[in-house]
Image (tube, rainbow, N blue to C red):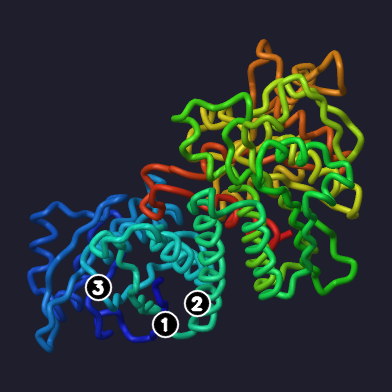
Amino acid sequence: MAKITLTTQRGFQVAADAYVYFVEHIFDFARFKPVADAFLPQLELIAKQRGFTGKEGSSLLLNGMSADNRPVYIILLGLGDLNEGSLNIETYRRALGQMVRIIESHKSAVVSLRLPDPALLSVSYERLAQETATVVYQASYHFDDFITNPDRKVYSDFTLSISIRDNNAVEEVQAGVDKGICIGVAVNKSRYWCDLPPRILTPTELARHAQEIATQNGLKITVFDEAAIKKMGMGGIEGVSQGSVEEARLVILEYKAEDINAPTIALVGKGVTFDSGGLSIKPAVSMEAMKDDMSGASVVIATMEVLAQLKPKVNVIALAPLAENMPSGSAIRPGDILTFYNGKTAEVKNTDAEGRLILADALSYAIANYKLEAIIDIATLTGACAHALGPFYSGLMSQHDSLVARIVKASETSGDKVWRLPMDNDYKAAIRSDVSDMCNIGNSKYMAGAITAAFFLQNFVGSVPWAHLDIAGTAFGVPDRSYFRPGATGVGIRLFTDLLMNW
């Protein structure tokens, strides 16, 4: 993984193998004359010949020579045009992703990067540095544990030397880098768990990783095994798990703020470590990525590591119900009725709508055992949400406008984008059952599967302000993002960090 250092030297004065500069829409050569003098006198001519202007998404890789006759690369990355609205922090994130890909392909050991002017991106130096570190770590992530050919391994062991424009901003930039690394490490940890084969990342194994995080960061942890889950009457977790030889777990992590009067926020993440669909079995093509169906759990667990280090002014409880959904002679059947922790019942009409069943118990437990100011669940819950919003926006559902406003604001600053879907009470009737309190899937005439799933969950949160995040489309396989590779994304960690650090 990349190492990040700071320097007050000008970028071109650092002894490096590659030099990175960000360019706004109009390529102003005067700014780059010192770089040209140091490495490539023909820089302006070559840039013009190749039509490089600094347009959003553009890049230019040039070969130069240092004063001591070392071959070096000059990497120019376009940030776009402020007047066209393309010059923003997300453009910068994507340019950083491009940078990492170029560094990887040329195996540059030391890279000098000059930070752009934070005012251009409407952020502080600290935030700019935070984004830089987080994205460099995100873009450098690669899951190649099971690739044996060394030529196919991805190169990521470079040192990034950040050149700071303002000597008075060194402490601010260092603070941002430290925060960004903390977030980037957690995002990648979540992605790694999701990318592991499901025969390795079982409920008990993910619970073990949560225990490690708790031990290393001074967090309180409680892990309920399957016997305790049954004894507490958590019929949703028990029911989903009963078809598998792997035992279920319910993991609870607790962070305490310094202020004894601090409010408490709960995060609940769906943790189905493999989802075959159960007896309502999925087609093979739909099953391939279902090791990632524990993305929500991995996100809330990894988020707790960030919070333990950054220390928000709120108490945070993370709950992760963990189970496998498998078909067998002991699996739950369509037509079964489950009783949850809060005593409510649900008719199982489709065993592939299992995520909401385990979330129901975890939500109920949180409501019953903690005094909460708000509760938020995050889950790869419905294909309906993925089809509606695609891979770039997570679905946000809530009837609490003030909580929605907080989440939307954190979404805009963090880059984990959300889109609010309606939760009109007209949809409630979709989950009506003739034989129990509710059905686990909505009546097809109402369609809106993402919304009816949210209404199912609403039965387990009482009067506490609650929001539901459906990350079915954004948790893995996001295309056209330079800072993501194929596989998991860790979506939600950046959002939760911004949300809770600014509560």
Q: Which residue is mark 2?
A: 173
- Tell which tag, 1 or 3, sits nearer the viewer: 3
Tell me if residue 40 comes above or below residue 457 in the rendering: below
Q: Name the outermost residue toward the bottom.
A: 68
Q: Nearer the viewer, residue 102 or 410?
A: 102
Residue 479 in the figure: left or right of residue 435: left
Instruction: Name the amino acid, label 1.
Output: Leu
Q: Which residue is mark 3?
A: 108
Q: Does residue 295 appear in the picture of this structure?
A: yes
**Residue at x 61%, y 54% (from the top left corner):** 298
- How many numbered marks, from 0 up? 3
Q: Nearer the viewer, residue 16 or 200?
A: 200
Say which label, 1 or 3, has the lower sequence index. 1
**C-alpha separation, residue under disc 1 versus residue under disc 3:** 18 Å
**C-alpha separation, residue under disc 2 versus residue under disc 3:** 24 Å
Secondary structure under the numbered disc 3 in the rendered image: loop
Which of the numbered marks, if any, corresponds to residue 114? none
Q: Does residue 378 appear in the picture of this structure?
A: no
**Quadrant, the N terminus:** bottom left
Instruction: Name the amino acid, label 3.
Output: Ser
Q: Which residue is mark 1?
A: 6
Measuring from the top left, give residue 361's x and y in whole percent.
81, 42
Say which label, 1 or 2, has the lower sequence index. 1
Q: Name the outermost residue toward the front.
A: 329
